[in-house]
Amino acid sequence: MKANKILGLGLAFLSILVGTSCSDMSDIYKDYLEQGEQVYIAIADSLTILPGNCRAKAEWKLDADPKLKDCVIKWGENDSIVVPVEKAGEQWMEATIPNLPEGSLVFTAYTRDIYGNISLKTEKSQAIYGPTYISNLNARKIASIEAVDDENLIINWNSLDNCVGVNLSYTNRSGKQMEYFVAADELKTTLHDVQLGSEFSYITLYRPTENCIDVFATDTPYTMDFPSGFILDRSGWTATSSSDATHKNDGGEAQVLLDDDLNTYWHSSWSPDTPLPHWILIDMQNEYMVTEINVYKRKDNADCKKVELYLSKDGEYFESVGILEYQKTASPNNLVQTLMESIEARYLKCVITESYKTPFVSLSEIKVSGRLKN
């Protein structure tokens, strides 16, 4: 009797469970039935967004689906473009999207067919560039400018990430405005027929990513002046110094300052040591209109601290033209004194007044820029 009651309770429980399960399954099927039949059409596959200047280029692939009508690219709640599918079959499609805001955007792409069916959606995020990016661009730096003679010069450039190149504008000797493009990998530019001392300017071009569809330019041109003189030929020049009189035979004499070799150097007297200041006198043999003086420290050495520069026409009266003060580092190796205006001179005197290793000093090379007196 007891077993029958247990069996009856089990059957009743099973009946309730089965009834409940059937009801749940019915509800699930009911939900799908109410949605109707789903048709899955070809998607906008392999979506790629190529960034630009407040615009972008979208590229995607379509599989063969003869019923496709168009593709939709969205990037905001109410921002989208529609691209018609004009031919059937597997194909690559593309579209340029204008008037985009600067910043990071999420692009969503999907297709529609002639019956109104919509494909699954694909997404791609991409940074778009614009005015803020442009305002933060810097001009490519010039490492040095060196005039070779009275009409030719060399510009040495620093490398720059994401730089495409430089559009350079300058004036030739006839007064004509000239344009020259400097490629990003061009570190040395030689210009001919240049008007020395004239102003030049350049705009730096950028491409923020390799796949960017636009090139960006700095807001305003960067302006500089060409050297007003060229590096003078030092053939026949002589150098003397009161500080190296005892070192004529050890390679440390002052004449090595004119040998165009940074590995050789003049040094002050030692054993016995002579106190500061030390000085060097250079006879340029001709009168020049001097515009610039370039003094090189001894290579890989940080002893020299301060050098005073003087020019003279007769070797008797000297005019102070500047002071060079080096940091206590081996690099940079040289400092340049550019004169406000050219000065007529035959003699150059360098007076070393301070040292980081008193009283010892050394220099490797002295170069002068200018032109022969007319």
Image: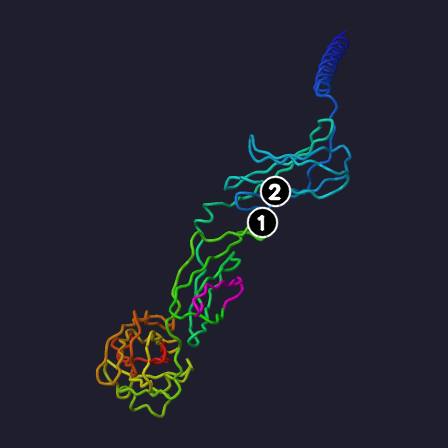
Q: Is 241 left or right of 54, judged from the image as shown?
A: left
Residue 171 position (above or below residue 370): above
Residue 30 is drawn in which quadrant?
Answer: top right
Q: Can you name the residue that lies furthest to the top here?
A: 1
Q: Is residue 98 visible?
A: yes
Residue beneath label 2, please? 96
Residue 26 position (above or below residue 319): above
Q: Quadrant of the C terminus?
A: bottom left
Q: Residue at x 46, y 45 (%)?
A: 131
Residue beneath label 1, please? 213
Q: Can you name the residue that lies furthest to the left here?
A: 317
Residue 365 is drawn in which quadrant?
Answer: bottom left
Q: Is residue 296 visible?
A: no
Q: Quadrant of the N terminus?
A: top right
In-front residue for pair 137/108:
137
Query: Magenta stretch?
Result: 172-188
Task: Find out whether the residues at labels 1 and 2 contact each other: C-beta distance under 8 Å.
Answer: yes
> What amino acid is at disc 1?
Ile
Residue 324 is drawn in which quadrant?
Answer: bottom left
- Residue 196 percent across, percent down from the top left: 40, 71
Q: Does the magenta-highlighted stretch encompass residue 216?
A: no
- Alpha-carbon span between mark 1 and mark 2: 10 Å
Q: Does the magenta-highlighted stretch encompass residue 182?
A: yes
- Mark 1 lies on a secondary structure that is loop
Q: Earlier in the sequence, mark 1 or mark 2?
A: 2
- Residue 184 percent across, percent down from the top left: 53, 61
